[in-house]
Amino acid sequence: MTMIDLVDTHCHIQSIGHNDGEETTIDLWSKLGLTQEEVIKRAHHQGVNKLIVVGCNLSDSYLAIQTAQNNDIWCSVGIHPHEAKKYVNDSNKKQEFTSLVHQEKVVAIGECGLDFYYNYSDHRSQREILEFQLDLAIKNNLPVIFHVRQAFDDFWPIINNFKNIRGVIHSFTDNLGNLEEALKRELYIGLNGISTFTKDHHQKEIFKSIPINKLLLETDSPFLTPVPFRGSINEPKNVRLVAEYLASLRGESLETLADQTTSNANKLFNMIF
Ligand SMILES: [Zn+2]
């Protein structure tokens, strides 16, 4: 097996072995039946040497920090747009969230953004909680992990109000116009297992057209399992399958894709401490 060095820039392994993380992940991890340590070891065996555990709400972000500190990996703290309505009018919770940003191993804010597909929170709450986190990112000079679904028309005007935002549009599956808007703002583009199983030809062309110096790899595990493991629980180790698929789709060697995406991740997330 070729020796390569990959980063999973977006996984949700913090709820493995817990009951108080992000709800939808807990069931999936219990089906997998592995510990955090085992999942991380399996990733290392595939050359996935660095992981960023992404927080989706307050308790989930606490768990992300704990997971990162216990396992010498990294994490982000964030309030997902689905959760926005639970925080928007609660200044105590917001204050508590703010204090997490300074914890050791925290390298980003997110995932945060707008999700007008599911609309689990009203749009006003989603906007306010996004702005709250953008403000934190600027004040602490941290990059942002964005979740944007069917909401780019509302997302760009908000971003324009915050100068010097650095970050990644995670799980990008939108059109060429919004890819160009992201690149114009020097944002990175995160791709995952969706690239291996989408049947959408236009989507594949868009994945091919992302400049390699703006590309990041992720799993979003336990979700979005790549081919050929569809139907099983996704793990950080599978970032290697995403890398292999994209290398062949884009006509690049696996080594080139791995080297460049890992260097992009190190540049954006400063994973040195
Ligand atoms: Zn995610």
Image (cartoon, helix red, strand yellow):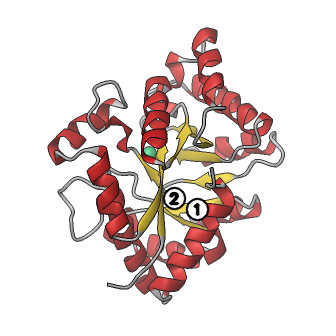
The amino acid sitting under disc 1 is Ile
Determine the CA span between mark 2 and mark 1.
6 Å
Residue 218: x and y in percent read 45, 59
Kindly report which numbered mark, 2 or 1, lies closer to the viewer in this rendering: 1
Q: Identify residue for label 1.
A: 189
Asked if residue 189 lies left or right of residue 48, the reply is: right
For the residues bearing labels 2 and 1, Cβ distance under 8 angstroms: yes
Asked if residue 108 lies left or right of residue 63, the reply is: right
Label 1 element class: strand
Mark 2 vs mark 1: which is more N-terminal?
2
- Which of 199 and 12 lies nearest the eye of the viewer? 12
- Identified at 45% across, 34% down, the residue is 66
Can residue 199 be spotted in the picture?
Answer: no
Can residue 67 be spotted in the picture?
Answer: yes
Figure label count: 2
Label 2 element class: loop
Residue 242: x and y in percent read 39, 70
- Which of 268 and 214 lies nearest the eye of the viewer? 268
Establish if 187 lies above or below 142: below
Label 2 residue near ligand 1, CB within 8 Å: no
- Quarter of the picture holding the N terminus: bottom left
- Identified at 18% across, 56% down, the residue is 232
Asked if residue 261 lies left or right of residue 18, the reply is: right
- Identified at 80% across, 41% down, the residue is 162
- Identified at 34% across, 62% down, the residue is 43
Q: Residues within 10 Å of mark 2 (few under 14, many from 20)?
A: many
Label 1 residue near ligand 1, CB within 8 Å: no
Quadrant containing ligand 1 reads top left
Q: Identify residue for label 2.
A: 172
Residue 221: x and y in percent read 35, 51
